[in-house]
């Protein structure tokens, strides 16, 4: 997939959507067998026997009925999980999204033509925006290459959610509104929203039927910045998007009741292509250490991010860039792809604008001024206070490991993703003295509207190997043998999960059927081992590979005593991000990453051990 850059192609981006296979329902017996295996590392003999009995009872009893109902549901839907997953994983969640659910990542332009440099924010910003807008046009014309595994097309639906998409807060459940249309489908919004110093501006990127050039975009951005820097700051209504969801929904309803014009403004922000954030911060960033810039992307100034937008493009004062987006409408690979496309274009053009310098006579941007009162201003202050309180508790490190990368692991016939996952298992084991239940994202885009499945990397094989690494009496050869067993197990699980044979989403489906039928919660889901092994969103290690494309991402931990661990893989390096909550005394992101790097070296050394 690495070489599938956006390019003009005979195939249309969304042409295979109707012929993709439906998401299958796995066999109940297989799923329960896999589930039992996954809880083993977290149980003593007695606990395991107890869970085994619960699983057996479920399989022969209520589980059978629920499976039948799930199969019925699947008959009428091409993806039986889609709506459920969206609601349970995202839209029903009431905690603030921006810190807990959103993901973000720094652009890697600093590694070549755009190192941090004051005074470059607008010039670079306009070039970056221009490339973003070209990508939008490729999507509208359906000229973005269809991603494939071999010759098999993957679902491309998530790419529809990149532009002109926004989450709307609801009292009990949020919703997603998507205004994007391809050219065949009709009109699509063509305005950008720009946030600067608590104020909101919009301008259309099309002028007389043509896309604005970078110098024209720069003129618009200059107008906005000059205005904001010479006048008082705006109220910063955007900060409300950082609130607890029900509170934000009520604040939004109140805002609309103050003046119907406020709804028009909200709709303009919601439908905008993306939100461009002019941020006054100048975070430190180097190719080896993205920690500070990543922290600012994930929890920077809340008055210049619209937390519910699928795509906030952040431009810092020193010409460093990043993105922050709502996770509900798509998974990280959508942002990874566009960021890689832009990075390639900046490289290709040596960081410069090589087109016409001519600037047409274009209307100036329009400022969107909310009608606010004391209550709204109070709500904004309250939102900012709770946001900064939680943000100050997040520890985040993003480092590059540069001793080796994919080339070396491939040479040793080790899958690089599995290599990092097992290093993380060993690191956690060494740091905490126990196995760490872990969630790794697998992609299910082989199926219609497929998104993700959970791989559980904390296997019996992985734990056995970790224990052997801590046991001085185990020979190197034995350690190597156990490590290779753990590799084989992980690779098989990843393959299963990507081909619709995972078990976590299946168990979720069964529990939701029970809920919909008004049945009591089956014992399987109340058993302490269910949550101790990670079930119900209790994974101590929440991890994801951001790909092989020079694009890094990061996310907050899933649980208070856990870590968020994202990474990407290159030929010569591994870049990892790790987050933890400072208020949890037992977790330390910095220490975990150091242990991961130590594990990388130890694993490579093991492979130097001659085979029997």
Image (cartoon, helix red, strand yellow):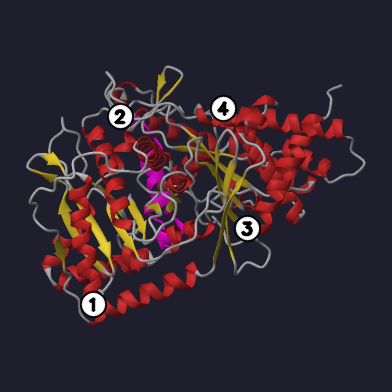
The tag earlier along the polypeptide, 4 or 3, is 4
The residue carrying mark 3 is: 589
How far apart are the two marked residues, 2 and 1, measured between alpha carbons? 43 Å
Q: Is residue 79 magenta?
A: yes
- Residue 168 visible within the image: no
Residue bounds of the magenta highlight: 77-102
> Marks 4 and 1: which is nearer the front?
1
Q: Which mark is residue 495?
A: 4
The tag earlier along the polypeptide, 3 or 1, is 1
How far apart are the two marked residues, 4 and 1, measured between alpha carbons? 56 Å
| Contact between labelled residues 1 and 4, with CB atoms less than 8 Å apart | no
> Marks 4 and 2: which is nearer the front?
2
The local crowd at label 2, few if under 14, some if 14 to 19, many if 20 or more residues have their Cα within 10 Å, is: many
> Marks 4 and 3: which is nearer the front?
3
Query: Which quarter of the rendering shows the N terminus?
Result: top left
How far apart are the two marked residues, 4 and 3, measured between alpha carbons? 29 Å
Q: Is residue 194 magenta?
A: no
Tell me: 53 left or right of 125: right
Label 4 residue SS: helix
How far apart are the two marked residues, 4 and 2, measured between alpha carbons? 26 Å
205 or 382, nearer to the observer: 205
- Residue 24 visible within the image: yes
The local crowd at label 4, few if under 14, some if 14 to 19, many if 20 or more residues have their Cα within 10 Å, is: some
The local crowd at label 1, few if under 14, some if 14 to 19, many if 20 or more residues have their Cα within 10 Å, is: few
The residue carrying mark 1 is: 232
> Is residue 367 shown above or below 323?
below
Tell me where residue 398 appears, x and y as whole percent: 56, 53
> Is residue 573 shown above or below 532?
above
């Amino acid at each position: 997939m690495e070489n599938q850059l956006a390019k003009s192609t005979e195939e249309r981006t969304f042409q295979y959507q109707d012929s993709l296979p439906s998401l299958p329902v796995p066999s109940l017996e297989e799923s329960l067998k896999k589930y039992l295996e996954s809880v083993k590392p977290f149980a003593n003999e007695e606990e395991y026997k107890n869970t085994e009995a619960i699983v057996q009872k479920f399989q022969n009893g209520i589980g059978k009925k629920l499976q039948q109902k799930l199969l019925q549901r699947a008959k009428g839907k091409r993806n039986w999980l889609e709506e459920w997953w969206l609601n349970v994983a995202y839209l029903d969640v009431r905690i603030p999204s921006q810190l807990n659910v959103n993901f973000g990542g720094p652009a890697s332009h600093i590694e070549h033509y755009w190192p941090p440099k004051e005074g470059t924010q607008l010039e670079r910003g306009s070039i970056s925006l221009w490339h973003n807008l070209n990508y939008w046009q490729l999507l509208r014309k359906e000229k973005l290459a269809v991603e494939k595994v071999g010759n098999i097309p993957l679902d491309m639906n998530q790419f529809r959610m990149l532009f002109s998409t926004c989450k709307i807060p609801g009292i009990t459940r949020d919703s997603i509104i998507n205004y994007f249309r391809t050219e065949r489908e009709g009109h699509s919004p063509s305005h950008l929203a720009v946030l600067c110093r608590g104020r909101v501006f919009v301008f259309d990127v099309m002028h007389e039927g043509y896309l604005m050039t970078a110098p024209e975009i720069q003129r618009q951005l200059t107008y906005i910045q000059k205005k904001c820097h010479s006048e008082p700051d705006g109220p910063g209504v955007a900060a409300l998007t950082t609130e607890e969801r029900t509170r934000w929904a009520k604040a939004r309803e109140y805002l609309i009741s103050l003046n119907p014009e406020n709804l028009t403004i909200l709709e303009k922000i919601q439908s905008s292509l993306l939100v461009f954030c002019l941020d006054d911060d100048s975070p430190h960033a180097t190719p080896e250490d993205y920690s500070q810039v990543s922290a600012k992307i994930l929890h920077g100034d809340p008055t210049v991010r619209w937390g519910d937008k699928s795509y906030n493009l952040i431009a810092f004062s020193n010409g460093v860039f990043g993105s922050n987006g709502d996770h509900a409408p798509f998974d990280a690979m959508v942002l990874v792809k566009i960021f890689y496309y832009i990075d390639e274009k900046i490289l290709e053009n040596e960081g410069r604008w090589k087109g016409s310098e001519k600037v047409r006579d274009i209307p100036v941007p329009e400022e969107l001024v909310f009608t606010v009162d004391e209550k709204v201003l109070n709500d904004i202050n309250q939102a900012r206070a709770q946001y900064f309180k939680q943000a100050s508790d997040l520890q985040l490190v993003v480092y590059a490991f540069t001793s080796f990368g994919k080339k070396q692991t491939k040479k040793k016939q080790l899958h690089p993703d599995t290599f990092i996952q097992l290093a993380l298992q060993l690191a956690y084991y060494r740091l905490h003295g126990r196995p760490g239940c872990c969630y790794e994202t697998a992609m299910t885009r082989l199926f219609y509207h497929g998104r993700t499945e959970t791989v559980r990397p904390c296997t019996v094989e992985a734990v056995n190997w970790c224990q052997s690494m801590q046991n001085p009496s185990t020979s190197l050869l034995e350690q190597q043998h156990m490590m290779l067993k753990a590799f084989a197990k992980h690779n098989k699980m990843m393959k299963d999960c990507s081909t619709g044979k995972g078990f976590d989403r299946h168990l979720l489906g069964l529990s939701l059927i029970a809920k919909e039928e008004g049945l009591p919660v089956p014992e399987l889901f109340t058993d302490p081992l269910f949550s101790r092994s990670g079930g119900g969103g209790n994974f101590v290690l929440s991890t994801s590979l951001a790909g092989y494309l020079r694009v890094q991402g990061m996310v907050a931990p899933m649980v208070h005593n856990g870590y968020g661990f994202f990474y990407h893989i290159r030929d010569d390096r591994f870049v990892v991000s790790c987050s933890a909550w400072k208020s949890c005394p037992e977790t330390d992101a910095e220490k975990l990453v150091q242990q991961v790097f130590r594990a990388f070296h130890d694993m490579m050394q093991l492979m130097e051990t001659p085979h029997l």
